[in-house]
Image (cartoon, rainbow, N blue to C red):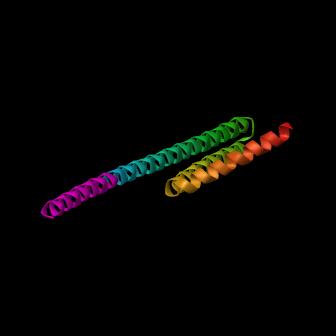
């Protein structure tokens, strides 16, 4: 009977050790999966931030270029006009340039403040543009 008790005790110890090892392995695996998920989520958010920053900078550049082109065109047209008309056209060009700069700054602030919304809006606009181009070709 004493051997049976020892064998049962050894079996229980072996079972406990096996359970503890399995539990530790499961915990390590769960922690590893959690780390991988967190890393992937962090990478995705960083990519979204980078995309929104790039989008904001592109919008700012386009707005500035358009404002500068409008100013240049207004100045070119103004050279042929009398002096008073020329001054008015230059003032209008300056105003367009300032409004373009203000609009680009506002857009950049909004994109930086709401990056996910900006990505969704950009995706929606892209889809609508693609839909319109596609529907015209058919």
Residue 6 placement (x, y as % from top left):
15, 60
Q: Give the residue at the far right of this rendering.
A: 138
Say if 79 sits above or below 38 in the image: above
Q: Is residue 34 left or right of residue 104?
A: left
Front-most of 9 and 67? 9
Q: Is residue 88 visible?
A: no
Residue 75 placement (x, y as % from top left):
67, 38
Q: Quadrant of the C terminus?
A: top right
User: Would you say the magenta stretch is mainly helix, strand or loop?
Assistant: helix
Q: Verify whether residue 132 appears in magenta.
A: no
Q: Give the residue at the far front of this rendering.
A: 1
Front-most of 46 and 32? 32
Q: Is residue 70 left or right of residue 31?
A: right
Q: Is residue 75 visible?
A: yes
Give the residues in magenta.
Answer: 1-27
Q: Verify whether residue 22 appears in magenta.
A: yes
Count of numbered marks: 0
> Image point 34% across, 54% down: which residue?
26
Say if 110 sits above or below 137 in the image: below
Q: Quadrant of the N terminus?
A: bottom left
Front-most of 86 and 52? 52
Residue 90 placement (x, y as % from top left):
65, 44
Q: Is residue 47 left or right of residue 14?
A: right
Residue 2 placement (x, y as % from top left):
13, 63
> Image point 67% across, 51% down: which residue?
124
């Amino acid at each position: 009977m004493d051997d049976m008790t020892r064998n049962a005790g050894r079996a229980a110890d072996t079972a406990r050790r096996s359970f503890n090892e399995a539990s530790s392995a499961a915990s390590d695996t769960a922690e590893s999966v959690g780390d991988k998920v967190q890393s992937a989520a962090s990478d995705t958010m960083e990519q979204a931030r980078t995309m929104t920053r790039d989008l904001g900078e592109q919008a700012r550049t386009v707005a500035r270029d358009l404002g500068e082109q409008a100013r240049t065109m207004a100045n070119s047209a103004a050279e042929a006009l009398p002096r008073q008309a020329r001054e008015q056209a230059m003032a209008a060009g300056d105003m367009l340039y300032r409004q373009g700069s203000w609009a680009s700054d506002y857009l950049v602030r909004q994109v930086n403040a709401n990056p996910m919304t900006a990505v969704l809006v950009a995706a929606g606009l892209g889809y609508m543009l693609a839909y319109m181009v596609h529907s015209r070709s058919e």
